Structures are given as C-alpha cells and as structure tokens.
Amino acid sequence: MGLAGAGAGEAQFQRARLLVGALMQAGVRRAVTSPGSRSTPLVLAALDAAAAGLDVASIIDERAAGFFALGQARATGVPTALICTSGTAPAHYLPAMMEAREAGVPLIALTADRPMELMDCGAPQTTDQTKLFGSAVSHFAEVDLAGSVDPLSLRAIRRTAAQAVFRSRWPRGGAVHLNVRARKPLEPEVNAGDASLAATVDALLEEPVEAAVPAAQPDPAALDRAAALCRRAERGLIVAGPLPLPSPECRRDGDVRGLAKLARRTGFPLLAEATSQGRFTEGDAAADAARLGAAWMADGGEGFPLPDLILQVGAPPVAAGAQRLIEAAGAPQIVLSDGPWTDPDGLASVFLFGDVESSTSELCRRLGDVGPDTEAAGWRGDVLRLCGRFRAAAARLEAGGLGFHDGEAAGTAVAAMSSDALLMLGNSLPVRLVETWAAHPGHRIWVASQRGLSGIDGLVAGFLGSLSPGVFPAGLLLAGDVSLLHDLDGLAIAPEYGDGPPAVVVVIDNQGGRIFDRLPIAKAGIFRGPAGRYWLTPHGVDFGGLARAFGVPYARVEDAPALAREIEAALGRRGVSLVVAGVAPGALAAAEESLRQAMRESSSSR
C-alpha cells in the first residue's frame, strides 16, 4: 500500500502508533513528552496508547523530562520512553542519557527529526541528529515515519521497537536512541481514505515480538577462587558501595542483596553505605559496622588493624573515610559487579560479573557453614568496638549542642523518614553527610542517588520521577542549595506531579559549595580570599520566592527540632514540598573537627 491509500498524515500516524504500541508490547509503560511540532505524530500515538494503559506525562523542558524519565526507570527497572521535537531539543537529553549509561538504568529517547531532503540546506530547526548521543547510548536506530507501508517495512518498525527495549536492558541497563523522521503533514487528515492500514497495524500489535532478557550468572571458577580467598583471610571486610534500587517485587526481602547473609557466613564486618540498600534495613544485622569508614577516618586509623581482603560489592564507596581505608590497606579485592569494571585502584584479584544477588548467594553456598577463626573474630570485634566509640562520640556531641550544622540536618532528615519510603541523596555533600551523621532510623528505607556520573544535574526531576510510578509511599530528597538552583526546572514539574506521593525536597542552605572545604583547594590562599566564590558560589537566593513561583508549600528552619516538625508535616501531605535548612557556612567543618577530637579523647582513655 502506498501513502496515497490512507493519506500521508494518516499513514505517518499509523506508523507512529505501531512504533509506540510495539514499545508497549515489549514492556514500556510510561512516556514523557515535551512540546514541539515535528514530534506531533509520536505524541498523538502516545496519547492513543494511553487508552491501553500507557502513562503519558508532559514536561516543558527536555532536560528535566530526561531526568524525570530516568527516575521512573530507576524506580521500576523498566525503560521510560522520551519524546521530543527536532533541533536543540534532543540535545538537552544528553546528561540524563549519560547518567543512564553509567548507572545501568534503561531509557529510550525518541527524537523527532526532519526528512532527509531538508538536511544541509538551511531548513529551520534542522541539524544532524544521527548518533547524536555518541557512546552514551548502547543502541541507535533510524525510523522513517513517512516511509513505505508495505508488510516488510511495518514489521521492521515492530522489530526496531522490540530491539530498543531489549538493548536498553541487556547486557546491562542503559540508554537507547531512536531518531524518528517525519514529513508534513504531521497530523492525520480527516476522513483519510480507508481503514485498511489501521487494521494492518492492529493485527501486527496483536502479535508481539518476545525477547526475554537473559540473566548473567557469575563464573563458577571465579566463585571457587573467591571462596578460597575468603577462607584464608584473617581480616576480611565487605564494602558495599552504590547499588541499584531493587525491583518493586524484590523489595519485600529485607536482605535484598544478600549482604547480611554474606557477612554472617564469612564473619567479615560489613561497611554498607547508604546507597547500597544494605544500610537502613529492617534489622540491625547489616548496620553493625555501617559507619566504619567514618569512624576510621575520625579516629585517624592509628594502631587500627587494616583489612587483608576486601569484598567490594557494587560501585566503589563514596565516603572519603571508606576510600582512605581501602587505599591504606592495599589489600587484594574481590569485586561483585553487575557489569561495569569497578576497580579504580587496580587492586582487584577476582571479578564476579553477573547478577549481584546470585554472586552473594553462590559465594555463601561455597563457604558453607565454616565460621570465622579466632583471629578473624578478633578483627570483627575491633571493628565493632571502633564503630561503637564513634556512635557514642557523635551522640555526645549532638546532645552537648554543637549548633545546627549540615550533618545534623542530614541526620534529622533520615530520622524523620517513614518506613519503606525513598531517600534520595544529592551527590555533593548530602551523600557523604549521611555516612557520618545519620543513625539507623529503626526501620527500612530505600536509598537512591545519581552516582553514575556523580553530578548534580536533574536531582529534583529525577527524584519526582522516581516517586511518580507510585512504588514508594513517600520520598525525601536531601540536596544542597547549589543543586537546587541547578535544577529549578525540576521544581517546575510540581504541577504535573500533582497530588502524587508525598515528595519532600530538603535543601541544606550553607550558601553554596561547602564540599570544597574538604578538598585541597581549601588550603590555597586564593580560596580564602574573594576569588573563593568561584568554587563556593554563594548565591543569596530567596528560596521562599522560588517556592511561591512554583506553587510549592515552603518552610525555612534553622534548628533540628523545627526541621523534624516540618518534614513530618510535609510527609503527611501529598505532592511536592520544599523545606530549607539554613546552616552557618563553615559550621560543618567545626562539627567534624569536634568529632575527630572526641574520638581522639575516647581512644586515649581506653
């Protein structure tokens, strides 16, 4: 059948309907669109698919849309489809596409494009979008909506959609780019000929292409080697860094990654960072040594025995204390990874690639019921005593009144979290503050971050996207003031988010950039002078004015009790709320020095 048989606009719509419908057949359940003309056939197809269950959101800015979709995919494990017009619009997806690749999150971008005859001739809103995202995507394909409508061409569209979903999930999650060309007319004509093309599309959509994603399992020989190293170790340590959120159906298991079981079977202490999903569990077995990195750093590590074997699960740790402990030990490492080569220090001896839960389970099975020997038990006792001293020192300081600082704000926010809620951590100070200052809240919470590239891009948008599917009862984003200013488009999503689950954005306002207080530049004279603003980026922004502009409930607090009250109130109402915790610049540095002094005093009094 040629285009004339159904009308050019109608034929394009039907091909777009086939593309979007085939994406749904392959598992896509959500689409995020941004306004534009060239994408009209795709948006019409998405709205048509809404009747079959596709959830379609409209977000004005493509950069925010990209991170919102990324958050949805992070929470569900299923790719969200992004739809935008041509020109500069798709370029705004790049940060989210890069994050998707590095974090292993499935994402599919459908970028509308002009037809080939308009390329390289000065046509408006036209540029070369072929492989626009380069190596940031795991798969690229072209779709021409104005092409032929013969059976082979239509089946090719269905196959392309199935391939896109498959490649977004295997061999590891990541971004896929479909560049979709369309010609005018972009809208279906009224009374556009017979309905045979629509019937053909319906028939194809009744015959889905099934492409099951294989499960990658760890190599048996590597598992045997890892088990032998564990048996020989006298001071083994499990370090669990950032790991993806488990799928909704797997969240019923408190020890979702098997970390607590692995710690019990090996007898090794467990340093579980918050983003590992093993820190804030229902029980306290996995939290016994969770703050070892912070404790070791505060204590200075003097006289403390170092590990002779490290089991690194997931990405490398974020906290400086954990990083320094690993560097100081220089011990061999066993890396359990779902795909990426995570060995920045070049110390790994064995890599267990594949499903992390399978790796921990198989390693436990090989270790059997052999408990730790006396020396290993003594090492574990040393670790637990150090962590106990650290917790006691931190509690004494908070009770003694250090003044409201960034760390107390982070600890208060975590303590206020409700059970099974989502805690999302900003990538500058917040993710590090939680490692030092946040105690176990007494129940399970899930933790997300955008640690793929460790940027502050799209934190608010990504947070709201993670909550929008409704798989968490509530959520709290802990971010810095500069991070919020970097994603004001995320706040603009509040009307689209509507009365979704309570979404509390807690901003630590320390007048910007205090992460640099911890870096070598802080010791330079230029940093302490007027030029220091190029790193610290003080802003003086009225966050209340921003909240009013976006119609978001707002509160500013300057002490921990008030912060706890405002978070509790915000978690009790649906939709987005903004709570700003004002702390004095430099208060955190003073609090951390007090903590180090308290640890030194407790060490000398033993």
Image: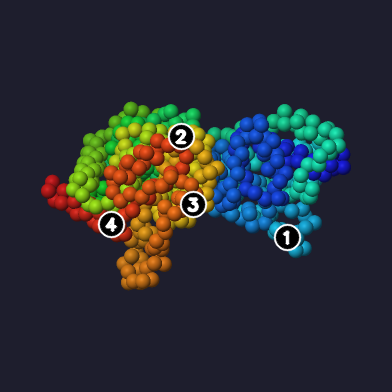
Query: Relative to 422, is 210 on the left or the right?
Result: right
Query: Relative to 21, is 281 on the left or the right?
Result: left
Quadrant in which residue 585 is drawn: bottom left
Which numbered disc, 4 or 3, marks the residue that appears first in the sequence?
3
Q: Residue beneath label 1, please?
A: 124
Amino acid found under the numbered disc labelled 3: Ala
Q: Residue beneath label 3, please?
A: 549
Residue at point 22%, 41% (across, down): 388
How crowded pointer 2 is (Cα within 10 Å; few <14, some 14-19, many 20+) is rated as some
Amino acid found under the numbered disc labelled 2: Phe
Calculate the distance from the C-alpha at mark 3 to the C-alpha at mark 2.
27 Å
Amino acid found under the numbered disc labelled 1: Pro
Percent x, y for residue 82? Answer: 62, 45
Percent x, y for residue 43? Answer: 68, 43
Q: Which of label 3 and label 2 is nearer to you?
A: 3
The answer to the question of whether label 3 and label 1 lie on touching residues, with beta carbons closer than 8 A, is no
Residue at point 31%, 34% (across, down): 442
The answer to the question of whether label 1 and label 4 lie on touching residues, with beta carbons closer than 8 A, is no
Calculate the distance from the C-alpha at mark 4 to the C-alpha at mark 3.
30 Å
Q: Secondary structure at mark 2?
A: loop
User: Mark number for residue 587?
Assistant: 4
Query: Relative to 87, is 333 on the left or the right?
Result: left
Q: Secondary structure at mark 3?
A: helix
Q: Which of label 3 and label 1 is nearer to you?
A: 3
Q: Residue beneath label 2, please?
A: 472
Which numbered disc, 3 or 2, marks the residue that appears first in the sequence?
2
Q: Is residue 447 visible in this depiction of the protein?
A: no
Residue at point 28%, 44% (across, down): 561
Amino acid found under the numbered disc labelled 4: Ala
Percent x, y for residue 495? Answer: 53, 44
**What colour scheme does the image use?**
rainbow
